[in-house]
Amino acid sequence: MAIRSLLGAFRKRSFVTRAVSCYRSLSTLILAEHERGVLKASSLSAVEAAKCLGENNSISLLLAGTGPSLQEAAAHAASCHPSISQVLLAESDKFAYPLAEAWAKLVHVVQQKGSYSHIIAGSGSFGKNILPRAAAILDVSPITDVTEINGSNLFVRPIYAGNALSTVRYTGSAPCMLTIRSTSFPLGATPAPSVSNAASVDKVDLSTLSEDDAIGKSKYISLSSQDTDRPDLGNARIVVTGGRALKSAENFKLIEKLAEKLGAAVGATRAAVDAGFVPNELQVGQTGKIVAPELYMAFGVSGAIQHIAGMRDSKVIVAVNKDADAPIFQVADYGLVGDLFEIIPELLEKLPEKK
Ligand SMILES: Cc1cc2nc3c(=O)[nH]c(=O)nc-3n(C[C@H](O)[C@H](O)[C@H](O)COP(=O)(O)OP(=O)(O)OC[C@H]3O[C@@H](n4cnc5c(N)ncnc54)[C@H](O)[C@@H]3O)c2cc1C
């Protein structure tokens, strides 16, 4: 019995030693997203998160795609953040669209060569789609939706729809794979590197991928997205959200008009999305987008916990609801009990025209 417990203690000790020793030198691979030749803000937040893992962390960015926009994104990535030391470029038709199967195989190939201690992606649909699949191939357990990093293996993540925070210590083998909540790692006022100290751009050797049949098992069909000049919901400074109370897609235009005047992004509750007032990409909440703007305005939103989970970190919350007992007032900094069909037209009238 004594021998068994001694052996158990030794086993535990060697396990911990393995976990610690693999972080002796930190190196992080970021799975980066790009659009129209520019790195997305969520990928830059992942760089900010990587900086929290520890000092002397060598940060590489993995970009994939085809054509000139990939080259432009690579040039942007190499020169947009001084902490990025290398940009890895995977150029192939297989990555024309961000399909999880192809990307997960790519991550496997890149990890085999680079032996990174950490792999990070943003917690958007891109990261949530790819990272778990890549983690399964690499046989490690990913830690998702991280909001705080306290060293190379200690992470905080919300649980129970954001009602509690859980601190997780990663004791597995490398790589430690994370998705991070972009709003928790805002971009600091980082000086852009000069052209002379831009990161190197290196091509990934894709020869082993070309024989892989599994990659072709899913097919890209189409992308439906709203073509709008409004700011991106995930990064907007102001968000104006409408709930079920708007009653129809036609009435929801009131929210859109107000957002237009304020230069804000439009958000919606799941009830408004399910009722078909607006597309799913505008949903804020546990199963939608997580936002943390400077100003969040909620009109006809009850404040269900699943909605609050997506906007509770907003700096200032304004709520308009005709029910004085609506739960949204518990998180609002400013609350107005009233009918949105009277209040929004009044606001539209009083706000100055957008220049
Ligand atoms: C697993 C799961 C995940 C979910 N994920 C999400 C999520 O990501 N995001 C999300 O939003 N929901 C989510 N939900 C749904 C959530 O529980 C609520 O049902 C939803 O948020 C309610 O939307 P609502 O506030 O628009 O509608 P309601 O709850 O119907 O509230 C409408 C509010 O409008 C007020 N109102 C009515 N008329 C007016 C008026 N004229 N002027 C002013 N106020 C008025 C009412 O007093 C009421 O408070 C999820 C649910 C589940 C079970």
Image (cartoon, helix red, strand yellow):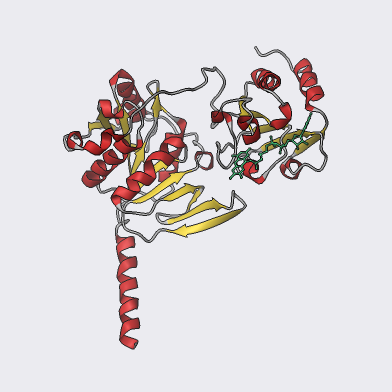
As rendered, which of 302 and 310 lies closer to the eye? Answer: 302
Which quadrant, please, contains the N terminus? bottom left
Query: Which quadrant is home to the C terminus?
Result: top right
- Point 30% across, 79% down: residue: 7
Residue 295 visible to an observer of this rendering: yes
Decide which of 355, 145 is in the foreground and name it: 145
Residue in view at x 26 percent, y 45 percent = 111
Please tell me in which quarter of the rendered image ligand 1 is found. Answer: top right
Q: Quadrant of residue 191?
A: top left
**Left/right of residue 330 with respect to residue 101 in the rendered view:** right
Left or right: residue 208 versus residue 168 is left
Image location of residue 120, percent across then percent down = 39, 44
Q: Which picture quadrant has residue 153?
A: bottom left
Query: In the orientation shown, which residue stands out farthest toward the bottom?
Result: 2
Residue 39 image position (x, y, % from top left): 40, 28
Q: Residue 175, relative to residue 294: is it above or below? A: below
Q: How many marks?
A: 0
Q: In which image quadrant can residue 246 be found?
A: top right
Which residue shows up at 46% across the image and 31% down it?
41
Q: For residue 238, say whether it is visible.
A: no
In front: 194, or 266? 266
Q: Is residue 238 above or below residue 67?
A: below
Residue 228, horizontal then vertical, whole percent: 54, 17
Whole-percent x, y for residue 306 in the image: 62, 44
